[in-house]
Image (cartoon, rainbow, N blue to C red):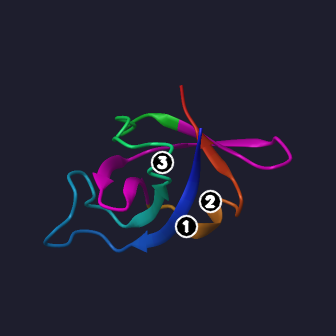
Amino acid sequence: MARIIHRFRWRGSSRNEPPGFKEPGLVLVLDPAEVPEDPGLAGKSVRFVSPDGSKKAAQVTASSKQTDGVGLLFAWAEPGLVPPDVTVEWD
């Protein structure tokens, strides 16, 4: 399980894009203290866990280790996909 430390809209391809980050969507950056390396979540499902314990699943399009943490791309997703104060968990 990991905290989200940053979130932003990804506009799609750029010159310095990480592999797989071609489509626009939502990028979530995970806390590097909790997830120091890319856990290989591209194509896998993760769950967003709210403070009240409710869960919502979504599929990761791409993941990549960056200087500020591991970024997860959810292609074509809107910011409302992930409520504030959730954590991310996976198997």
Q: Position of residue 27 (x, y in %)?
A: 44, 62
Q: Amino acid at mark 3?
A: Ala
Q: Position of residue 50 (x, y in %)?
A: 76, 49
Q: Which mark is residue 16?
A: none
Q: Which mark is residue 33?
A: 3
Q: Which mark is residue 81?
A: 2
Are dots 2 and 1 in contact, CB under 8 Å?
A: yes
Q: Amino acid at mark 1?
A: Glu
The residue drawn where x is 65% and y is 48% is 87
Image side of residue 58 versus residue 76, left or right: right
The magenta stretch spans which residues?
Answer: 46-75
Check residue 2 for magenta coloring.
no
- Tell me if residue 58 comes above or below residue 5 in the rendering: above
Q: Earlier in the sequence, mark 2 or mark 3?
A: 3
Question: SS for tag 1?
Answer: loop
How far apart in space, not on screen, are marks 3 and 1 (Cα)? 26 Å
- Tell me if residue 31 comes above or below residue 24 in the rendering: above
- Tell me if residue 13 comes above or below residue 82 in the rendering: below
Name the dominant secondary structure of the magenta segment. strand
Looking at the image, which is closer to me, 85 or 57?
Answer: 85
- Camera-side mark, 3 or 1: 3
Q: Disc 1 marks which residue?
A: 78
Please identify the residue farthest to the right as the structure is shown: 52
- Local packing at callout 3 (Cα closer than 10 Å; few below 14, some 14-19, many 20+) is few
Q: Earlier in the sequence, mark 3 or mark 1?
A: 3
Please identify the residue farthest to the top as the structure is shown: 91
Please identify the residue farthest to the left as the structure is shown: 15
The residue drawn where x is 51% and y is 35% is 45
The residue drawn where x is 80% and y is 42% is 54
Q: Amino acid at mark 2?
A: Leu
